[in-house]
Amino acid sequence: MLVPIGAGTSIDLTDTGRGPAVVLLHGWPVTAVHWRHVVPVLLRAGYRTVEVQARGLGSGSTGRGDHAKATLAREVLAALDAIGVRRFAVVGHDVGATIALLMAAEQPGRVAALAVEEGVPPGIRVEAAEAETYPSWHRPLFTAPQGVAERLLAGRLDATVDAYLGGSAGPAGLDFGAHVEYMSAYGSDEGLAATLALYRAEDVDALAVRRATRHRLPMPGLAIAGTHGRAGQVAEALSHAVGRLHQVTASSAGHYPAEEAPDAVNGALIPFLRAA
């Protein structure tokens, strides 16, 4: 459903179940389909799930604001206010991890627990290595000077998304249906401006993250990584933000552990949430 939050902006979310709330924020270039193996387990465990599509990620949310992750974090918090969610745990994947971290820093009293899946927020320096196969070519492409990336990618974004999804997944690859869904959501020129804006905000995002992590946040953190993805970088990055750190690394997964190794992710996430 679309939740209006003012200034012409509406946030697309799916609110399911009853119990303590768990907010799920996916990254680029996936959709809420990313959580298809997590949501049923959370619901059976007695949680309320709120799958949020932050503006610029997918095509559901609307509005014309900037794509700084602090702005997106405030928009998600406003949408949660609108549906009556006061206290919650939050799980963020990729770009969604940066949004989740900034939400926790903005309103720490509301956030019971912070889980980060395959996310290394800009502004946090890490020494650990990512997997050799994890692609890094997309970042300089998307942050090329204004006009250059647009000319290079116009009419070719589908091939770019396809290459990134294939290169960032683990050895088995993503489920074919999910891969097709993500291609459909991000592969057209309609989403090009938002994709570039998400990445071009990294300098602003880095400043916001450095401010947010000057002091450790009070909630516990769970780092979820794939051996073929960001690997040890995820836990190292999250250790800069929280004082109580838990971690799980899925040996078969790349950048999408919740899809590629759901048993490992759910097996760590449910106890983590219960203990928070």
Image (tube, grey):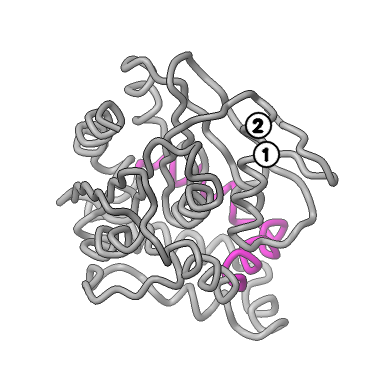
Q: Which residues are magenta?
A: 175-201
The answer to whether residue 183 is magenta is: yes
Residue at x-position 68% and y-position 40%: 60
Which residue is drawn at the image coordinates 24% and 76% (left, top)? 127
Dot 1 corresponds to which residue?
Answer: 78
Instruction: Indicate whether 271 appears above or below 164.
Output: above
Q: Secondary structure at mark 1?
A: helix
The residue to which callout 2 is attached is: 81
Crowding at mark 1 (Cα within 10 Å: few <14, some 14-19, many 20+): some
Q: Secondary structure at mark 2?
A: helix
Magenta region, main secondary structure: helix
Q: Position of residue 43 (x, y in %)?
A: 39, 18
Quadrant holding the N terminus: top right
Residue 72 position in % (x across, y down): 63, 52
**Amino acid at the residue labelled 2:** Asp
Q: Is residue 141 above or below residue 229?
A: below
Say the numbered circle drawn on residue 217.
none
